[in-house]
Image: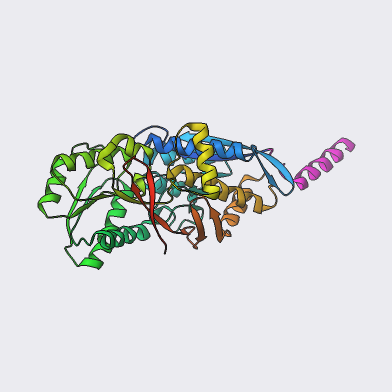
Amino acid sequence: MKFVAVLLIATFVLAACGPAAPATIKIGINAPITGDIPKVGEGTKFAAELWLEEIGGTINVGGKDYKVELVIEDNESKGESAAAVNTKLITQDEVLVIVGPQASKQAVPAGAVANDLETPMISPWSTNPATTKDRPWVFRTPFLDPFQGPVIANFVTDEFGFTKAGVLYDIASDYPKGLAEYFKQAWEELHGEGSVVAFESFTTGDTDFSAQLTKIMDAGAEFIFAPQYYNEVALIVKQAHELGFTGPIVGSDSWGSAETVNLCGEDCYGLFFSTHYAAEGATGATKEFIDKYNAKYGYVPDDVAALTWDSLNIVKTAIENCGKLTGDIKADRKCVRDAMANIKEFHGITGDMTFTEEGDPIKCAVIVRISEEGKFTFYKQVCP
């Protein structure tokens, strides 16, 4: 009886103590390491590893240092794989929070998983509203396409005075499909119904765009808006030039990879695109990040790397603001989610942000010009 009593007392004491606080904070990184856009995954991975080095591998919460472990998983640039990665990170790896996916095609389905399993997720690069809409557990670092579409429409109108637009986009991918629609709406509000004289689509994996480009040219488009990823941009621009198109081809933030110029070469010199930051001419903390990244990896970081850096610092701030980690993963995830929701202003290397109730930042966009040396140069800033 005496032994049973002691055992019961010990059990009650342990129960009262609750779960032990974790020794390690696990942060999931859901990235396209392989597939259509591996450079996006590389930039994400490199920025995350540089960030881990920068913080000394630890985060202090309530006066206690916790080791930080990055759990990096490849989503193969596919939506279904990104959703499966989130499921693994949450249920098997038991990460506290997830950074990524990047492209909207992966972030939208992965965000559904994170929200359903009540794990905070922040996308560094997804601009499609569906990623965060009605998902209190999902956040983002970039601006949204309903903002980006009008930014591009207004820029082209002011810069060139054009009234006839052609659009070429991937109908099978959430990001270009959504942004193409937002641009079309904004352009026709400025220039009237039918002023988008050609609205041509293709499907992911296509490499011959001559039929669509011919239709755009025959319709009398003065320029082409192509909100595509770097692997498609070079093909589109080169094929347009081969067909004799001489007008500008304008891009969006998906052009922000160094691979755009590596693949496109001189065909892309002089072209404009909207994005989140311009590396050329950067100052302050932004320049410090660029210099450290360049010194370590041998090239200037793309916008996705800079946005990943900001995303991880938002996560770090939220974890610190929790004040305490209990070891109960559900409770700790809820604490981080609430802390992220309470970050109303953040000063990042991609700009100052204020956050909406949906977890979306209100921030400025940058118009970049690709110089004759192939560098992304700051042209102008556009703010809400």
Q: Is residue 231 left or right of residue 167?
A: right
186 or 378, nearer to the observer: 378
Residue 273 at x, y = what percent? 33, 50
Task: Identify the residue shown where x is 51% and y is 60%.
Answer: 355
- In the rendered image, the residue lying farthest to the left is 218
Residue 89 on the magenta span: no
98 or 156, nearer to the observer: 156
- In the rendered image, the residue lying farthest to the right is 2
Task: Identify the residue shown where x is 27% and y is 58%.
Answer: 156
Task: Identify the residue shown where x is 65% and y is 54%.
Answer: 321
Residue 126 at x, y = what percent? 41, 49
Above-or-below relation of 186 to 4: below
Q: Answer whether residue 92 is visible to the viewer in this image.
A: no
Q: Answer whether residue 295 is visible to the viewer in this image.
A: yes
Which residues are the magenta region? 1-23
Residue 49 at x, y = what percent? 55, 35
Question: Which quarter of the image is occupied by the N terminus?
Answer: top right
> Which quadrant holds residue 25?
top right
| Count of residue discs | 0
Q: Is residue 156 left or right of residue 35?
A: left
> Which quadrant holds residue 259?
top left
Residue 4 on the magenta span: yes
Magenta: main secondary structure equals helix
Question: Which quarter of the image is occupied by the C terminus?
Answer: bottom left
Residue 142 at x, y = what percent? 44, 53
Q: How is the image coloured?
A: rainbow
> Which quadrant holds residue 80?
top left
